[in-house]
Image (cartoon, rainbow, N blue to C red):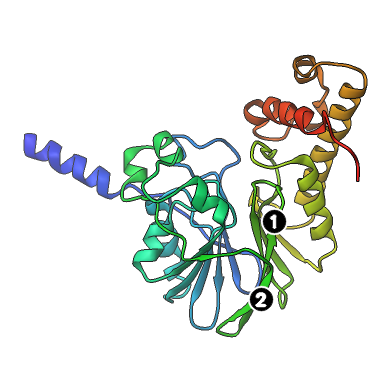
Amino acid sequence: MFKKIVLFLSVVSISFGYDLKPIQISKSVYQFIGKTEAPSKANGGNMVNTYWIKTDKSYIVVDTGPSYNYAKDAHKAMKKIADLPIKYVINTHMHDDHWLGNNYFKELGATIYGTKAQAKKFPVGSEAHMLSVIKKEDSANTKIINIDTFVEKDFSMKVDNTPLDFIHFDYAVHTPEDIMIYLPEEKTLIAGDILFSQRITSIRDGSVEGGLKSLDAVEKMDVKVYAAGHGKFTDKTALQQMRDYFMALKTTARKAIEDGIDINTYVKTADFSAFKDMAMMEVLHKGNLGFAYSEYEFFEEK
């Protein structure tokens, strides 16, 4: 009987998986859609969108997800489309829900691109908060490794026959540094957490002004497919939802400051009922109100 129980537990451990299903959103780009909720044991941290670019000879992975096992399962799903080597991994920013699968792809020989902000926040040997949230089965084998190449400015490169534009923000948007990837031939923008749909963003490491400035930059681009860091929409929905929320933060915070309303009262009374159906309001919104108020308290419009 004891042997049977041990065998059953082993099977349960081995059979664990994320059950990831890729969606093709343009000629070369495939999307894995995460849930619009906070990371938890129930979802294994699968609350982020990750992307794969298929070239003639290889894959480029843009964001590797919340764990080694997530990355492994995504690779398993993509092998069914084409069994190609993974040439490059690109981390769009420093938040750990987006890149904790890095070491899986490094084991396969991929070169990892990312930001200095990420390396500073998460040096090798440090602990990622995500791994304390999800189950041990989910986080198994996950570890923080070095970034091979830092992205510090805009540049272009061709991988096999696929041209890519790296767009680097050197001012605080979602984080102190953010990267977007643009495929000019397909007019597809992989925006990372510059864009959200269906749920609100967090500005704890960024800024409202930086967010609005980044949206201005995106709107000037020739884009048909908007691949957001969170949420399912690939049209201009994310652009509009982000701008509406940022503008509401800006206008209400500035009005409160002008009227002499203190930060605590503002956080308690600001009317954001127009956004009540957006996911993560209960989790992130009050914090965003506080950050916005602090940002505009001594702000001078340029």
Q: Is residue 33 visible?
A: no
The amino acid pointed to by label 2 is Ser
Task: Please rate how many residues cluster around mark 1, counting C-alpha atoms within 10 Å: few if below 14, some from 14 to 19, many from 20.
Answer: some
12 horizontally vs 27: left or right: left
Give the image location of residue 33, x and y in percent. 57, 52
Q: Residue at x 64, y 40 (%)?
A: 205
Q: Which residue is mark 2?
A: 156
Drawn side of residue 286 relative to residue 273, left or right: left
What is the total number of numbered labels drawn onto the structure image? 2
Q: How many C-alpha atoms fall within 10 Å of the one at disc 2: few (<14), some, or many (≥20)?
A: few
Of residues 128 and 97, which is closer to you in this image?
A: 128
Q: Mark 1 is on which residue type?
A: Asp
In the rendered structure, which disc, 2 or 1, sits on the residue that comes first in sequence?
2
Q: Which residue, given by chain and number where applicable, does mark 1 sit on?
A: 170
Q: Nearer the viewer, residue 237 or 260?
A: 260
**Depth-wise, is mark 2 or mark 1 nearer the camera?**
1
In the rendered image, which quarter is residue 9 located in? top left
Q: Does 299 appear above or below 81?
A: above
Q: CA distance from mark 2 to mark 1?
A: 17 Å
Q: Position of residue 259 (x, y in %)?
A: 92, 19
- Image quadrant holding the N terminus, namely top left
Picture residue at 84% right of the left edge, 55% below the top: 216
Relative to the observer, which residue lies in front, 60 or 24? 60
102 in relation to 130, above or below:
below
**Contact between labelled residues 1 and 2, with CB atoms less than 8 Å apart:** no
Q: In the image, which disc is placed on residue 279?
A: none
In this view, 50 is above or below 79: above
- Find numbered disc 1 in the image and state the secondary structure of the residue it sits on: loop
Q: Could you say where residue 84 lies in the image, as x and y percent from the top left? A: 43, 76
Residue 87: x, y in percent?
A: 46, 74
